[in-house]
Image (spheres, rainbow, N blue to C red):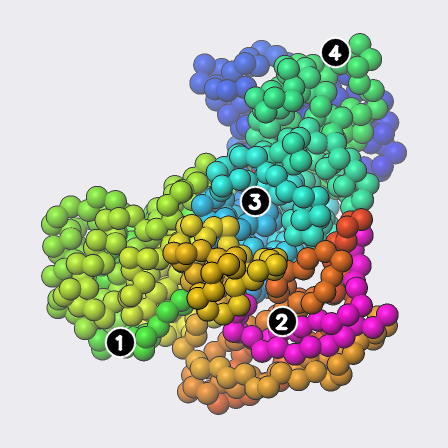
Amino acid sequence: MKQENLSQLIEQMTLEEKVDQLLQLSADFYTKAAEEQTGPISELGLTDENIQNAGSILGLAGAKEAIQVQKEYLEKNRLGIPTLMMADIVHGFQTIFPIPLALGSSWDLEAAEKMAEISAKEAAVSGVHVTFSPMVDLVRDPRWGRVMESTGEDPYLNSRFAEAFVKGYQGTDLKNDFFRVAACVKHFAAYGAALAGRDYNTVDMSERTLRESYLPSYQAALEAGAKLVMTSFNTVDGIPATGNKKLFRDILRKEFGFDGVVISDWGAVKELIPHGVAEDEKAAAKLAIEAGVDIEMMTTCYSHFLAELIKENSIDERLLDEAVLRILELKNELGLFEHPHRGASEEKEAVILSEEHRKQACEIAKKSIVLLKNEAILPLKKEEKIAIIGPAAASQDVLGAWSWQGKMADAISLVTGAKKQGDNLLYGSESFDYFHPSDSAVDEAILLAQQADKVVLALGETEWMSGEAASRSDITLPSAQIELFKKIKTVNDQIVVTIYSGRPLDLRGIDDAKAIIEAWFPGTEAGNALAAILWGEYNPSGRLSMSFPESVGQVPIYYNCDSTGRPLETTNDEKYVSKYLDVSNYAKYPFGFGLSYSDFHYGALELDKDTLTPDDFLTVSVTVTNHSDISGTETVQLYVRDLVGEVIRPVKELKGFKQINLKAGESKTVRFTIEEAMLRYVHRDFRRQSDPGSFEVMVGPNSRDLQKAVFKLMN
Ligand code: NOJ
C-alpha cells in the first residue's frame, strides 16, 4: 500500500478504531473462552466488538491458529486492516540456540546473525511478524536474572551484536521476504542497571553515563534498521521510561531519528500508577501517549481513556494519528495489507527443528561455551573411563529462560551427547535433584566417581533461576551441589565441572576443580555441543562477555570501570586506596577471558607511528602463533585508554576484535586500525568528541592480559 493511502485510511477511521490500533492483547483473548480469561483481558469482556479489533496480538504461534485468527479478525475489521502478531523469539523458536549471554561469549557476529535468521524463519512460518528481540541492555550485575538476555557488559560488543541480530531477523527485504520478522529492540532505556540487580527496580545514573555506556547498543540496533523499540520497566532520572518524554521524544525520536513503533513493556503503562507518577489510568494514558508510546501492551489505559482525553481536549488528536500511522506503516512494511497471513504456512512449518537448524544450533552452541580452567585434564580421551554425574548430567533443562516454544523433550542432555564421544562412560540411573538430591543418588555418584579415571561433574542453575523476575542475592551454585563436589573430591580429584547457568556465578566452593567449563544454557543441542568440547572434537573458543566476580560482594564488577583518585595499582598491601579488605578488586575470570586447547603466543605489539591526526589512521599489529599441535580459534582484542580527558575515562575500552583460526604451529599477523572517530566520548555537554593527547593502546587475549603502547592524538 502506498504511503498516501495509509493517511487516507486513517482519515476514514473513527476515533475508537484508531485507539484500537494502539492496543495489544495476548493470544488468549482470541483463543480462549471468556470465562478462561485473566488479567486485563478479563476486564475487557469478549463482547466488546471494538476491542476485538486490537491492533496487535502477543504470543500467538502456530500457522493454523494464526491464519484462523487473522481471517476472523479481518472479517470483523470494517476497513480491512490486518492485525500484527508479535512474540518473544529471543534465542530461537523451537530450535533453541544458546542464550544471548552465551552468544555474546562466542564473539562471533556471523553466528548471532545466523541464529536470528533461523529463529525468524521458524517464527515467521508459524505466523509471527515481530519478535521482541534483541534485548541489548548493558549489564554489570549478575544478580539480575535478565543478564542472560543480554550480550554482556561492553557497549562496543553489545552494539555489534545488536546489529547482527537485527540483520538476521529482518534481512534486507522485510516486505517480500516472509521468512523474516521485524525486530523490536529493548528495553529502552538502561534496564540493565536496575539497582542492586533486583528486577523492575529503579535505575539512577547520570545522563553522561547513560549516553556513554548504555545508549550506544540501542542506537546501533536502530541504525541497523530495527523497526520497533520497547520501553523499559525502570525509571530514568526519576521518571518511569514508559512515561518519559525526554527519553522517547527527545532522544529516541529527535536525536536518533527513529520513526518506527514504540511499544510499552507488558503492563508498563498502567504501572505508571504504582510508580507514583500517575493518579489513575487516565493520567497514565496521557503520560504515555505524550511520551511517545504507540502501543500499550496488555493494559487498557489507552482503550478506556484516549478517546475521552481527546474529546475533552486534554491531548491533541494528532498524537493518536501519529501513533496509528506508525503502526499502519509497520503493517505495510511487513506486507500485511497485501498478504495478511504473510509467512504463516502449515506446510512450511516443516522447517521447524529441521536437521539443518539443529546442526546450526549445535555449531553455535560449541562457539559459545567458555573453558574457564584446565589443569591439563581436558580434552578427555576416548579410552578413559569417565563418570558423568551430578544434577545436570542427564538433565534436559538446558534451554534457558525465554525459550517459549522450545521443548525440553527435544533437547540433548550431556549424557546423551557424551555417548557419541566416549567409549567408556559411567553414568547414574537415579534422577538427581539440583537442590535436594536423594542419598541414594549421591551414593551412586560417589561410587561411579570411585570407579572412573576422571569425573565430569555436571552442575548449574535450572532455567527458572535466571530470566525475568529471577534475581538472586547469592550467586553461588546451590549448596547441595557444592557439597556434592566436596564429597566426590574425596574419592577422585580428577574433576571437570561443567556449568549450565544464565549468569556469571561466584564459583567459590568448586573452583579447585581441575577444569571448569561454563556452558551457559546452550539450547536444544546442549549435550552434543558440550560433549564435543569435553572430548576435544571442538577446540573451545568462547570468551566471556561478562566478568565472573570472585564474590558477589564485588558486584557490580566490570572491566571498563572508571579510574579513581586512589586506584589500587598492583598489590593489596596499600591501605588508603580504593579496595576491599576481604576480596580483591579483580574479576575471577575477566571480560574477554576464555581458554583453548591450543597454546597461543603473542609477539610484540607494534604501532606504525606514535602520533595520529584526525584525517589519518594508525595501524596496530601483533603476530599470534599457535605453539600447540592442534588448530584453534583465537579472539584478538583491542582496547584503548584515554589517559587524560575532560571527564574521567574508563581504564580500558574495547575498540575492536578479530577472530583468527590458527593451525598447529601457524602464525598470523593481526592488524587493527585506529582513527580519531574511535576515540570520541561523551563530554560534559553531551557532545561526542575526542581530546588531543596521549592514549594507551592495548592488545591481548582478554581484558586483563594485555600488552601496551602509547600514541598521541594531535589536533
Ligand atoms: C516482559 C518483558 O520485560 C519483555 O522483555 C517481554 O518482551 C514482554 N514481557 C512480552 O512478553
Q: Which residue is mark 4?
A: 308
Q: Is residue 441 left or right of residue 266?
A: left
> Which range of residues does the magenta coloring cover?
687-715
Question: What residue sits right under mark 1 in the picture?
Answer: 382
Task: Tell me the residue that label 3 is attached to.
Answer: 192
Q: CA distance from mark 3 to mark 4?
A: 36 Å
Q: Nearer the viewer, mark 1 or mark 2?
A: 2
Tally of numbered tags:
4
- Residue closer to the observer: 350 or 704: 704
Q: Please, what secondary structure does the residue beneath circle 1 have?
A: loop
Give the Cα separation between the discs numbered 4 and 1.
73 Å
Say which mark, if any, is on residue 124: none
Residue count near mark 2 (Cα–Cα under 10 Å), binned few <14, some 14–19, many ≥20: many
Separation of marks 3 and 1 at Cα, in angstroms:
43 Å
Give the labeled residue for mark 2. 638
Image location (x, y in percent) of residue 386: 22, 69
Task: Give the CA distance from mark 2 to mark 4.
Answer: 56 Å
For numbered disc 4, what is the local secondary structure?
Answer: helix
